Image: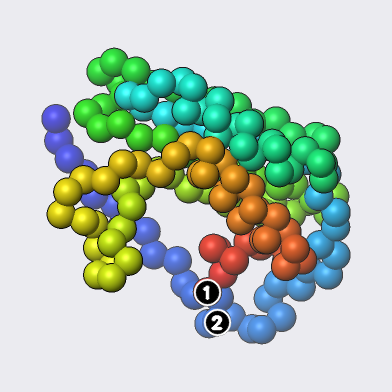
Amino acid sequence: MEVCHLLVLFPLMSEYEPDGVNWIADGFVKKIRGTTFSARVSTQFENSMIKAARRIINPLLSDVHIFSDHRSGPPAGNSPGYGISLVAETTSGCFISADTAASHSRDEDYCSLADEKSDLMPPEYIGERIANVLLGEIAQCGVVDSMHQA
């Protein structure tokens, strides 16, 4: 098997005229779609993330669909993991997203992984956190989520 590396360079928007993009109406959120993913863990992890995210979002919007994508066996790789990605679509065609994956807890004093491997973050916490992050992005009334802005 041959390995190939591809380097893609995109120019910064600051090199263009300031009025390159002029989006006036951000619109209202009409639907939220999402996907949970997991590998080498129980499918219950995905169900927990979905329930936690829906517990926060459903009182605000009824058109919410979060799908699950579970892998097991050889296609799942060698390491356990799970995460969630949510995308809100507005009436003006804007897409605002938020996503995360489970990670090990970090030592707050040294900002690094602890010497001993800690447990992964609980799936309920991940579901709640990403729902709150998405609602925070929506509350900023932008047309592009802050992760994709320079």
Residue in the picture at 42% in, 35% down: 82
Q: Is residue 15 above or below residue 98?
A: below
Q: Is residue 122 above or below residue 71?
A: below
Amino acid type of the residue tagged 2 in the rendering: Ser
Along the line of sight, which residue is nearer the eye, 25 or 85?
85
Amino acid type of the residue tagged 1 in the rendering: Ala
The N terminus, quarter of image: top left
- Callout 2 crowding tier (Cα within 10 Å): few <14, some 14–19, many ≥20: few
Along the line of sight, which residue is nearer the eye, 24 or 133?
133
Give residue 33's position: percent from left, percent from top: 68, 37
Give residue 53's position: percent from left, percent from top: 64, 40
Asked if one can make out residue 79 in the rendered structure from this viewpoint, the answer is: yes
Give residue 86's position: percent from left, percent from top: 61, 43
Please name the residue that numbered disc 1 is placed on.
Answer: 150
Residue in the picture at 45% in, 66% down: 10
The answer to the question of whether label 2 and label 1 lie on touching residues, with beta carbons closer than 8 A, is yes
Q: Which element carries disc 2, helix, strand or loop?
A: helix
Q: Which element carries disc 1, helix, strand or loop?
A: loop
Residue in the picture at 82% in, 45% down: 60
Answer with the quarter of the image where residue 145 lies.
Answer: bottom right
Please name the residue that numbered disc 2 is placed on.
Answer: 14
